[in-house]
Amino acid sequence: MHYKELVGLAVFGLLNIFSISAQKTYEFTDFGYPEETIAWGTHTKVSYFIPVNRALLLEQNSIQLDFKTSQAIEASKSFVTLIVADTPLATKSPLEEDHSLSFTAPFDADDIVSGYLKIEVLNNFSITGDVCELYNEGAVWVRRLASSSITLDYDKSYKKPKTIAQFIPKVDQLLIPENPSYDVINYAAYIQFFFEREFGKPLKIDSIPAVYSAQHSNSITLSEFEKLPATLQTATTKEPQSDGLIELHTLDSLENASADATPSPVQTLVVTGTSTSSFNKAAQSLLDLDILQSAYTSRYSVKEGIDMTYTGLSIDQEVNLKQLGVQQEVTEGIGKLTKEFNLSRAVFGPSLTELEFNLSFKHRPINEQEQAYVNIYLDNVLKFSEALDHTGAFEESLVFEKLNLDKNTSVKVEYYYVPAGGLCIENPVSFYAQLDLENSNFKAISYQEDEDLDLFNFPENFLTEAPAIYLDIPFNRDQITALSTLIGFMNPNPKSSRHVFPKIFPVDSLKTKTLHYNPIIISSKSQSITEFAATSKPYFELNAAYYEFEKDDYSRYFDLAYADAIGTNQLFKIGDARAMFMYVPNGDAAILDLLITTIDKDDSYKRGNLVLASADEAYVFDLKNTDGIVNKDDIQSKFDIFWSNYRVFIIFGLFILMIVILIYIFQKSQESKKNIVDEN
């Protein structure tokens, strides 16, 4: 009996451990790093900054780093050092057999500084003199393999948060009224997008219950005050009508419990206001990262909302490297050293043709016996190269012309340093450099007049002015997630500190108000497209059972009746504004989701302006390829110019050709005449 009790206690202990501990292994791509990273040269350093929630971190955390090195190095005399939180943890040599090596190292909450775990990898490789002289830098490298990972052990047990800042990381659902107002729809979509983007928390959307149960714990209740359940209205302290209110409530749940059971706590964060203005202020306060560092109480009132205006792209728009999310670090080593980051096309828009890059960094001063250069690459194409000098400072303005940027352009700053005596000497002095993130910036110089209005250029072609979403569909709360996804596409830079929050209106406001936005119209009425596209004929029209396309040559493909409900997503113009129209039969959330997510599929580079989608699959079509449209006036003009310049030569050439043909005919006639005479 005693033995069984021990076993029972052991099992109970294990279950308890699993109930409070949730280990998860992440790849480096989950933190925005490439699947693999390559460092070139005999002496280099690569740094990684991994975001970690220190407050929830338990003890079973670890780093797994797997490397493969060049075969050209002398493995026994070469070393790789792992440094975590500025503390060296291990130094190893690659295996002689396959030149691989691995590190497995634990870490804990004390290693997390300012929300990040800092990992550095230093390599010091040895190669023989003849190999060094023969192959130089290209033969020496170390590659972090895709199998590398970070394991985080987060506390998932229920510990009743006492403050809003403690509660926010536990939130997993968003509760809204059964029939929400447009204000609630707006902020529900904003909050769902923001929490997933900034906190990595995908929120489930559900309706506010009359009675809260355990399934509603760890929730945000988003509603105007008058639509809150009576229990919450009674428990919530009313603020002045002009102030928004955020209050953490702990309720008791007796659902599915026996009469003598202890109530289980249910916590929900009520976001409300007694007027439209105060409700908006309260909801806006959740769209601020500072809430995790400032909301150290269980309730607070909001007197001023945040600035959510969007002014559109301007020709002189400027963004520095810090705003692009580039991490501050020192690049150190010898040979080829790189610092790489991405420039999203959405920062400046798709029609950008000329871009200025102001580059500023500090480096170790270079003496006369050393050589050092900085090279700038755009998508691995060398754009600039210059030698560094003894001043230890570099500032230069570069202009990139005739740009044709992809959605994300790779920018690489490469330092190439040769120490005194060359790369093959032992124990060389290292080079180091650090980018000035505040003073290094990109600035738009010029744009082309217009760009193709197609899905390839979305969302940039909608960010020239403030975008807005207009709804004309029967409401379904699952549509909130699709709208949140659409908002995410309008914010393509995951490291941007400022977000685009398009306003969501009923479609009637588009008909009655002067157009101030680039509209995205979502309607369950197929004929709406002709109403909104009166000034610019769409590529297609919708009838009850078939599609009619503007181009006759497409009718053989698309003049078909269909049995299933088919939705469409198409781009067109309303005057100077760019517009998107989505037809969603019956407001089907699954069709709406595919019409939106297909915009950002990997094959969108094929370019297109129409999406057809059922509830199960979607396809992109290009029905208006401007390159293939024949401009008769342009052809006539070019012909007139050609004729005026070369008509003399053309007439003379035709005259010579006519003479040659006549001579040929005459000779043939004479030969035939002679043959006839000879036969006689």
Image (cartoon, helix red, strand yellow):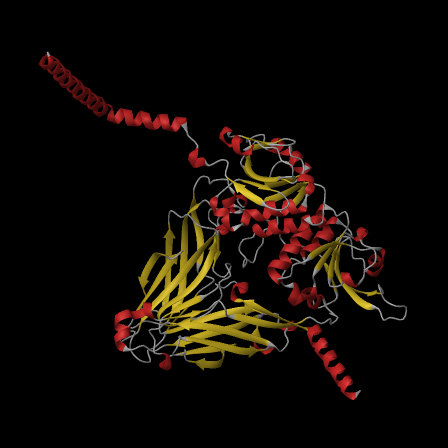
Quarter holding residue 337: bottom left
Identify whether 454 is placed above or below 237. above
Q: Is residue 432 toward the left or the right of residue 11 in the image?
A: left
Q: Position of residue 645 (x, y in %)?
A: 25, 27
Q: Quadrant of the N terminus?
A: bottom right
Q: Is residue 412 toward the left or the right of residue 668 in the image?
A: right
Identify whether 13 is placed above or below 249. below
* Residue ranking furthest to the front: 680
Name the residue located 12 percent from the left edge and 16 percent from the top edge.
675
Q: How many marks?
A: 0
Residue 310 in view (yes/no): no
Q: Position of residue 640 (x, y in %)?
A: 32, 25
Q: Position of residue 463 (x, y in %)?
A: 54, 46
Nearest the camera: 461 or 241? 461
Name the residue located 69 percent from the left edge and 77 percent from the top edge.
17
* Residue ranking furthest to the bottom: 2
